[in-house]
Amino acid sequence: MTSILWFRRDLRLSDQAALIAAAGEGPVVPVYILDDETPKHRAMGGASRWWLHHSLASLDAALREKGSRLILRRGKSDEVLTTLADEVGTQRIHCIRHYEPWWRNAERAVAKQLELVCHDGNYLAPPGSVTTGAGDPYKIYTPFWRALRERMPPAEPANRPREIPAPSRWPESDRLEDWELLPTKPNWAGGFSDWEPGEAGARKRVAAFVDAASDYDRTRNLPSIDGSSRLSPHLHFGEVSPAYVWHRVADAGGSVDIFLSEIAWRDYAQNVILQYPDYAARNARDKYDALPWRDFRSSTVREEFDAWTKGRTGYPIVDAGMRQLWATGWMHNRVRMIAASFLIKHLLIDWREGERWFWDTLVDADYGNNSVNWQWIAGTGIDSNMWSRIMAPLSQSEKFDAAGYIRRWVPELERLGDDVIHDPDAHDCRPRDYPRKIIAHKAARERALEAGRAI
């Protein structure tokens, strides 16, 4: 029996349950559909499209080594799959199950017309399967992680099939280049060259991290040190399964439990959006609907938001993070929290504006992680920081020894010493080409606290 293998965010051949099942039944037609219609307002951002281009090229090359190939089509997923099924003479579609609200809608639409077989494999446990004793989904992370931990380790990752049977005739395919996923002029992705999208690149990144994982708890919060796994985009695009990562890292020794709990956060975020599909658009706590955000239509507010996106706030640690994001499509996690808190609490700009900016500029822009993390910082989420918890970017910068990080990403400050670089204004050594703080920390803190008291 010929079947179609529907790829989405599972761009790998190893530990790929949908591929294994399809290949065991007969000829397989692998397809990736560039669908900007089903997600509506959640089409992939620019940085994700850059990654997607290279990941699809890598996947096609891996398939061709197995005597197969990747068919590319563009359009609404259910319509494209129905057309393709007619072309190859089948009703059977295999896929990895997804949990973003638009993909759940797409799966329902496909299942009405074709025989859709969904498989698990993008998370440590199927979202929705980890529940309380009463059978309810968890809302708070810590008990969720405790319950998930009892079910670990995950099953051993499966090897890729020895062969992928090909159909007697291949359907037509779009050319990847014609999708224009890469930037043209200006080429804002020039600094993305350190990344290696694709399954091979993901496995290299896992191997490199395993060698350093035992020291992870000490280095993970230090932006000047390359202590992060940098696996997030590979996991987001499914170039490596979390089960593979777990089994490779779990025996590394040292502080790996911290890292494993962060892998589990991906599962938690998917469980949240399964319960609250519009999590990126609505406060999980209704009382925050009354929060007096500053008016984003105001030219002053828009100018301050623009300064934040460009790394021109006058707070070196925030500016370094935002410039790293623009240059590389990624930002150190500790700095993400500081930069997000600054936008929300210091500038009193609605967290959803920041979430949308990250969605467009992160190569690891994940609907679950992105929306859950922003609501955690804002205090509006079902499990989140308190509104009154306001990160102090200047003291955070010193605490986590960010001097080297600042010098790398804010070259205007590269000649300043470690004792003054975190706050040049306070030490009266701010270079002329570096902006003053757009708001003083004390004034921003008082304004944020007053906004919290207002609700």
Image (spheres, grey):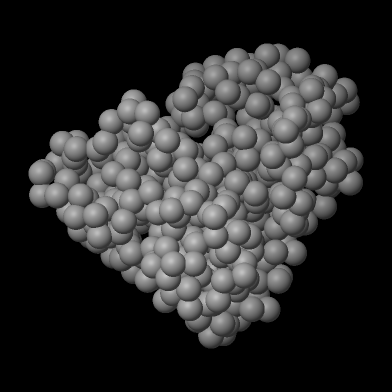
Point out residue 288 in the picture as x, y percentages from the top left corner: 19, 41
Left or right: 174 in relation to 104: right
Point out residue 200 in the picture as x, y percentages from the top left corner: 77, 56
* 230 relative to 8, above or below: below
Which residue is nearer to you in this view: 251 or 287? 287
Quarter of the figure with the N terminus: top right
* 85 relative to 449, above or below: above
Residue plotted at (44% across, 58% down): 315
* 156 relative to 70, above or below: below
Residue plotted at (68% across, 20% down): 74
- Return the residue found at the far bottom: 254
Quarter of the figure with the C terminus: top left
Point out residue 334 in the picture as x, y percentages from the top left corner: 46, 64
- Return the residue found at the far left: 454
Q: In this rendering, does residue 204 appear at all?
A: yes
Residue plotted at (45% across, 50% down): 313
Point out residue 2 in the picture as x, y percentages from the top left corner: 75, 29
Residue plotted at (62% across, 40% down): 48
Left or right: 181 in relation to 96: right
Which residue is nearer to you in this view: 211 or 26? 211
Q: In this rendering, does residue 13 appear at all?
A: no
Which residue is nearer to you in this view: 56 or 388? 388
Left or right: 244 in relation to 420: right
